[in-house]
Amino acid sequence: MNRREALAALVSLPSVTRIQSVPANADDVIVAEVDHAVSIETAELLKAHLQDVWPDRKIVVLEKSIQIKLVPR
């Protein structure tokens, strides 16, 4: 699956509402935001599609109501 096919597949999934940008650095994490609750299976499918395009990236799927913050030690 090439990048164009993967993006087309992602857009066709009902839970995907937007893809904002492609990470520029090899150690960046891809964050996929969805507007509603998704099943674990849907989140894993989304991650699998993204990993086909960016195989060495970490991927996080977040529902709109989930917020993650970093706090310094």
Image (cartoon, rainbow, N blue to C red):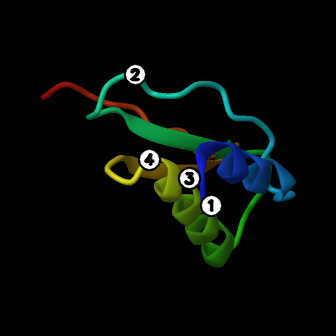
Along the viewing direction, whichever of 41 and 26 lies nearer the viewer? 26
Quick check: 72 above or below 58?
A: above
Closest to the camera, between mark 3 and mark 2, is: 2
Identity, as a three-letter code, of the amino acid under mark 4: Trp
Q: Quadrant of the C terminus?
A: top left
Q: Earlier in the sequence, mark 1 or mark 3?
A: 1
Closest to the camera, between mark 1 and mark 3, is: 1
Disc on res. 46: 1
Identity, as a three-letter code, of the amino acid under mark 2: Ala
Q: Residue at x 51, y 49 (%)?
A: 53
- Asked if marks 3 and 4 touch (Cβ < 8 Å), the reply is no
Disc on res. 7: none
Q: Earlier in the sequence, mark 3 or mark 4?
A: 4
Along the viewing direction, whichever of 31 and 71 lies nearer the viewer? 31
Identity, as a three-letter code, of the amino acid under mark 3: Val
Closest to the camera, between mark 1 and mark 2, is: 2
Q: From the viewer's perspective, is 33 left or right of 37?
A: left
Question: How many marks are shown on the rendered structure?
Answer: 4
Which residue is tagged 3? Answer: 61
Distance, label 1 to label 2, CA atoms, is 20 Å
Q: Residue at x 69, y 43 (%)?
A: 4
- Asked if marks 3 and 2 touch (Cβ < 8 Å), the reply is no
Which residue is tagged 4? Answer: 54
Q: Earlier in the sequence, mark 3 or mark 2?
A: 2
Which residue is tagged 2? Answer: 24
Closest to the camera, between mark 4 and mark 1, is: 4
